[in-house]
Image (cartoon, rainbow, N blue to C red):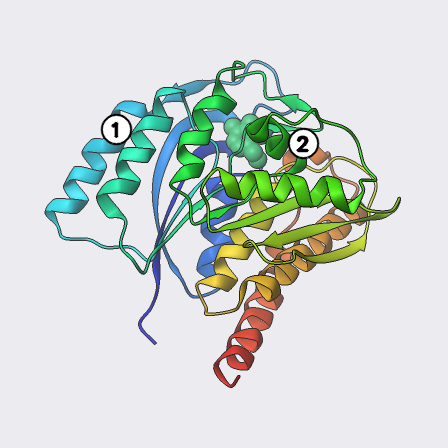
């Protein structure tokens, strides 16, 4: 099989293990070539650190795309995460239009909020602008807070009823993506997981919840999901692999008792992740 090539469009948080410093190693470990478009450069991410530097790279994105077009480059997927400005929502939508083919995947992680709160760097118009990008996505990967903001649903804490989650998934699909992959789904105390839905009955996968707030885990999840998908693994299995890897990284970090602002120890699990993805790839091929 030809090697797959994707573009990861996130910020570079120089310290803190999120966005590009997660997407690059995780997706590369699965044998996929990763090109990047940095949306901003920060000294650290914005979660729990103060005084961080912030350089917005909005003006560089379309010139980068223009150069790539002049080289005739094509990509199997575009994967967006944290964006550096409101203006970037239109810029990325334009980029998607330039590079969309019938057989490539636009994956949007609408990174903007968690635990019921919009990140402080964004104002209340950001989720409304984000809906335009969701419209162009093949796969949308929000957490519950982001899903609520995107669909005008009042946020509440879990456990949720199945009806609440199914309505949320349907409203996400109405925004335009082919698939909604919703993280942070909880039907009973102590269990947390993911729902995948493309219009038929949603599929769920849960693991025991590890208490605590761990930074960058949304990026670990979405990067792993895409790494598996690019290897021909189906959506439901890819979501399972992504949940299992994220839980494993959180567990390892918890035992290491490091400051959770510095992200999770995913590095020690990369070899095992690659092996699992290749096993699932073989199974998918022989099916
Ligand atoms: O992991 C999401 C993320 C990415 N990039 C930056 C962030 C955050 C979450 O807070 O601040 C800069």
What is the number of the mark on residue 103? none
Q: Is residue 64 left or right of residue 277?
A: left
- Is ligand 1 within 8 Å of the beta carbon of the residue shown at mark 1? no
Q: Quadrant of the N terminus?
A: bottom left
Depth check: 152 or 116 in front?
A: 152
Q: Is residue 82 left or right of residue 92?
A: right
| Mark 1 lies on residue | 60
| Residue 135 x/y as whole percent | 41, 38
| Residue 180 x/y as whole percent | 55, 48
Depth check: 99 or 60 in front?
A: 99
Q: Is residue 218 above or below residue 202?
A: above
Please name the residue shown 31% across and 24% down the image.
58
| Mark 2 lies on residue | 261
Q: Is residue 163 above or below residue 239?
A: above
The quarter of the picture where residue 200 lies is bottom right
Q: Is residue 146 above or below residue 22?
A: above
Residue 251 shows in the view: yes
The quarter of the picture where residue 66 lies is top left
Ligand 1 resides in the quarter of the picture at: top right
Depth check: 243 or 215 in front?
A: 243
* Element under disc 1: helix
Please name the residue shown 59% across and 21% down the image.
119
Q: Residues within 10 Å of mark 1 (few under 14, many from 20)?
A: few
Please name the residue shown 59% across and 43% down the image.
170
How far apart in space, not on screen, are marks 1 and 2 (Cα)? 29 Å
Tell me which numbered mark, 1 or 2, is placed earlier along the sequence. 1
Residue 48 shows in the view: no
């Amino acid at each position: 099989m030809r090697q797959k090539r994707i573009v990861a469009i996130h910020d570079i948080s120089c310290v803190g293990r999120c966005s590009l410093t997660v997407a690059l190693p995780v997706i590369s470990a699965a044998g996929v070539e990763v090109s990047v478009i940095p949306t901003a450069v920060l000294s650290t991410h914005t979660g729990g650190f103060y005084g961080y530097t912030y350089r917005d790279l909005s003006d560089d994105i379309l010139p980068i795309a223009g150069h790539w077009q002049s080289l005739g480059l094509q990509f199997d997927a575009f994967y967006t995460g944290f964006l550096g400005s409101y203006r970037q929502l239109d810029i990325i939508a334009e980029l998607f239009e330039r590079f969309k083919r019938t057989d490539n995947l636009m994956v949007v992680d609408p990174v903007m909020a968690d635990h019921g709160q919009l990140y402080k760097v964004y104002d209340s118009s950001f989720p409304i602008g984000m809906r335009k990008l969701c419209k162009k996505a093949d796969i949308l990967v929000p957490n519950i807070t982001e899903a609520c903001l995107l669909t005008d649903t009042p946020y509440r804490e879990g456990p949720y009823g199945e009806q609440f989650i199914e309505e949320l998934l349907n409203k996400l699909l109405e925004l335009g993506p082919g698939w909604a992959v919703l993280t942070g789904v909880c039907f009973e105390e102590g269990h947390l997981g993911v729902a995948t839905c493309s219009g038929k009955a949603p599929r769920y996968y849960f693991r025991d919840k590890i208490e605590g707030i761990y930074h960058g885990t949304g990026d670990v999840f979405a990067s792993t999901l895409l790494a598996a998908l690019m290897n021909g693994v189906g959506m439901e299995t890819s979501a399972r692999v992504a949940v299992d890897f994220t839980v494993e990284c959180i567990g390892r970090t918890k035992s290491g008792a490091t400051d959770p602002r510095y992200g999770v120890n995913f590095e020690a699990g990369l070899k095992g992740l690659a092996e699992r993805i290749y096993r699932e790839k073989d199974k998918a091929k022989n099916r």
